[in-house]
Image (cartoon, helix red, strand yellow):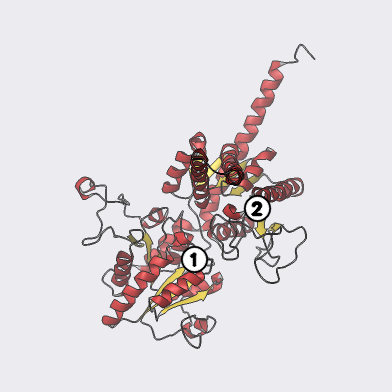
Amino acid sequence: MRILQVTGFPNNGAGSGALITTQAEDFVKHNHEVCTILSENRTDFPRVPGVKYHLVPFTAEIDQPEKIDNQLGFNFPMFTTHTRSTSTFWNLSLDEVKAIEIKYRNAISEEIATFNPDVIHGQHNWIHNAIATEFGLPVVVTIHGTDLMGYTRSLDRLTEIRKEISNGVSDNRLMELKAESEKYFYFVEQAKKSAQGSQRVIVISEDQKQQFCQLFPEAADKVVLVKNGYNPEKFHVMENVDKDDLFSTLHSDRTSDGKLPTDYDKMVLFVGKFADFKGIDVLLDAAKKYETQGAKDGLNIMTIIVGTGALEDELKRQAKELELTNTHFVGLQVPDVIRPLQNLADVSLIPSRKEPFGLVVIEGTACGHPVIGTNSGGIPDIMNITGKIIKEHYNPEVDGQDSNVLAPNSGTKGTYTTPLGMLVPVDDSDELANATLQILNGTIKFDNDAIADYTKRTYSQEAINKELLDLFNQSIAELNQSKKLVLKKSHSQGPSLDD
């Protein structure tokens, strides 16, 4: 099968980029042809051997950005900031957004002519996929969560603008608001076009399915849940990791010589981009608490934070204000560095305020350790394999009477233990710190081998891709059948009296 992946973002530095790269690797491994249209501000981005790439070029936010033919004069926009871009859809003008639209329409048109895809797999229910639906080919779109946030934000901003206009504004302000209104209305219409024009809409969690169906009820019958997968060749249990050798390649912001200490007792790990919804500020507050308590108990706990982004300076200031002496920012790292770090870690923390899926959850469990995540978004879908329902907000008077509902751990405000780790309430550094300590001091124990084995059996990309290929084939067959019906109807009507 020839699969055209269309994404508005790079294939690295964010969850959706890592996901399509993993999918492409496995498709190519099984003799499918893949072409990826993507946004980039450099030509040396990581490439999967055997995949054709079509670059839509932007300009990097650095002193001497790479000169790329026909590049747009601004950086690629995101819903939230990227590790290599602070540009968002919200700070672009409508003219700049339309310039992106032209680039993508040309790119898709060119690849349909040259690559001749059987199916288009769009990423995010947004402008890029809306364009893909214009060419009469089967389109399957994957929702990643930030697109739903973007759609909701657009609707909310339109409401705010209309309210401000109704209260009376100056002529100049009215012109500004009308221009802004046109942009957000365009976002809304493009998202609707994407949803309505796709043959299938893939969601990656039950929470996301509910959100999408509420926002796009006219497309609810197209929704299919397919969870994200990972590459077991990149994330797996390693028999031996040379800690000294690994740490020599990393630079800490917290030590005078930049070296990571090796004399710790337990290690906590965070991997992700520095965006507000990731909740890293909550992690730092929790780190202060578990570091302090751990020291009192004779436990030297080190926290390593991998990643970068727009909030980096702010988060480092917070760590300094908290006087965190054993929490180290080590920057953006490649999978070959993250994997051994995951193997050394005793626990990974994912304190997201609203995580659509949480690829880093299964990357951590694949490396054989428990994860502590928030009880929100798509994380409970991964973590909760208890067979019982875990409520985001447990009501003991009502839920306590239902044997199908799991009660939170005794003495907590909403923390749950599952075979893969623990779920804690959003924005609660106390519960996050306590859960971390319980794992590190052995109060709550996990079977790390069983965690790794379950992850491989459930989330290996090879198994997930089989589901994707089934959906692609269904979409191809349905579109072909629809075209036949239209043709048959046209023939049955016969010539008109004007012919």
Q: Quadrant of the C terminus?
A: top right
Q: Residue 149: x and y, percent? A: 49, 49
Q: Is residue 278 left or right of residue 445?
A: right
Which residue is more in the foreground, 302 or 253? 253
Which residue is more in the foreground, 264 or 159? 159
Mark found first going from the N terminus, 1 or 2 = 2
Amino acid type for the residue under numbered disc 1: Gly
Please report contact status of discs 1 and 2: CB closer than 8 Å, yes or no: no
View extreme (top): residue: 497
Which residue is more in the foreground, 77 or 391? 77
> Would you name the residue on which mark 2 appears?
32
Distance between mark 1 and mark 2 Cα atoms: 30 Å
View extreme (bottom): residue: 257
Vertical placement of residue 487 versus 311, above or below? above
Amino acid type for the residue under numbered disc 2: His
Element on which disc 1 rests = loop
Q: Is residue 229 left or right of residue 1?
A: left
Q: Residues within 10 Å of mark 2 (few under 14, many from 20)?
A: some
Front disc: 1 or 2: 1
Q: Residues within 10 Å of mark 1 (few under 14, many from 20)?
A: many
Element on which disc 2 rests = loop
Vertical placement of residue 308 versus 73, above or below? below
Residue 456 visible from this viewpoint: no
Q: Which residue is depicted at the point 54% across and 70% down?
A: 335
Q: Residue 310: x and y, percent? A: 53, 66
Vertical placement of residue 280 versus 203, above or below? below
View extreme (front): residue: 170
Q: Which residue is depicted at the point 35% across and 70% down?
A: 286
Q: Which residue is depicted at the point 60% across and 38% down?
A: 197
Question: Which picture quadrant has residue 191?
Answer: top right
> Would you name the residue on which mark 1 appears?
272
Vertical placement of residue 363 versus 295, above or below? above
